[in-house]
Amino acid sequence: MDTDEIIELEKKYIMQTYSRQPIVLSHGKGARVWDIDGKEYIDCFAGVAVNSIGHAHPKVAVAICHQAQKLIHCSNIYYNKEQVELARLLTSISPHDRVFFANSGAEANEGAIKLARKYTGKGEIIAAENSFHGRTLATVTATGQDKYKEPFKPLPPGFKHVPYGDIQAMAEAITDDTAAILLEPIQGEGGVVVPPEGYLEDVQALARENDILFILDEVQTGFGRTGALFASELFGVQPDITTVAKAMGGGYPIGAVLANEDVASAFEPGDHGSTFGGNPLGCAAAIAAIEVIVGENLAENAKKLGEYFKGRLEDLMGKYDIIEDVRGYGLMLGVELGIKCDKIVDEARKMGVLINCTADKVIRLVPPLVIKKDEIDKVIEVLDNIFASI
Ligand SMILES: Cc1ncc(COP(=O)(O)O)c(C=O)c1O
């Protein structure tokens, strides 16, 4: 099948929920991917910030192959070694004591919302405007962007939104029925929005004062993306619950709710569950992926190369008025333009670079954390050429 045939079949058989780029990817290596016609791309999107260890990492590939030959799935009615090993690893690298395994970021957030309600016996979750927490009914309701939820009403009750970064609005939103505050440490889908200095610390203090839980959605920021293993380290906070997914499995779908002992103990048998959550295959993939992230110090790499990338983007900002802002931490960078960026995404793809446009005007750059300096230089060269031609 060629590219046109595959696109035609997709249009015929698959529900049309995605606006796709017209290329068919076949394989990848490190920060590069190739389409079925053999065209090479530098991947600055990494499957929506998932492929942090790069494409086709041999350690994850071997772990998946070995595990698939032993036991892929066994349900949570029985124990499996890979699940407890992964839970031990996650608690050793995060500020948390216990884990619930899910299969995606939205599921992890669903679990966190349920846990917060069960622990506090209260209903209300305060989230931020412009946030993104997933597509299930509860997480799309937690998401602070109307376009994702309007067509799906009625939505579950118990969610309210305040402007991100406004501590006064957060304080005023808390009531006797507030269970938790749910925030992204950096808003990803919302346009790589960085919180004002001290904001997350102030939110944490507010949560502690009012006896409510502080949940950090690290689905996109987790596992080294921002230059620290978790963005909570970057901002000096210790949430009661952290949700993770995306980079966790090296591309294999897996997510988790991480919580402190006291909070985690609110979940009792029967309270929550998942048929596939914590299956041996996913856990083996995640153990290998996290060992690569920690063992190869990819957070440090993200910090160093992120600073270099950001500096080069700032140089472009000095050269082109169309660039209004460059922001972000590590290899989670946003370039805000004065115009919509979808055409720039098309041009970059034609020139061999995959980038993403979010919040209409923000180019989001979230490459694998193994990207090399010369690959960043190539991305800058392509963006430079595109901006020069506008
Ligand atoms: C911060 C955040 N939370 C949750 C999600 C939802 O994750 P998933 O698509 O794996 O359900 C995303 C996805 O982009 C995200 O960026």
Image: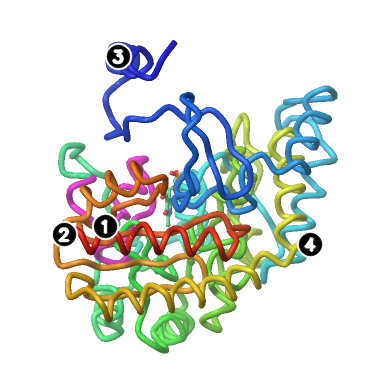
| Label 3: few (<14), some (14–19) or many (≥20) C-alpha neighbours in 10 Å | few
Pointer 3 residue Cβ closer than 8 Å to ligand 1: no
Q: Determine the secondary structure under disc 4.
A: helix
Q: Is residue 315 magenta?
A: no
Residue 14 falls left or right of residue 149? right
Q: Earlier in the sequence, mark 2 or mark 4?
A: 4
Dot label at residue 295: 4
Amino acid on which the number 4 mark rests in the picture: Gly
Q: Which residue is mark 1?
A: 386
Residue holding disc 3: 8
Q: Is residue 320 above or below residue 374?
A: below
Q: Is residue 333 left or right of residue 279?
A: left
Q: Assess disc 1: are there few (<14), some (14-19) or many (≥20) residues with their C-alpha within 10 Å of its C-alpha.
A: some
Looking at marks 4 and 3 on the same chain, the residue that comes earlier in the sequence is marked by: 3
Mark in the foreground, 3 or 1: 1
Judging by the rendered image, the residue that carries numbered circle 2 is 390
Q: Are the residues tagged 1 and 2 within 8 Å (C-beta)?
A: yes
Quarter of image, res 313: bottom left
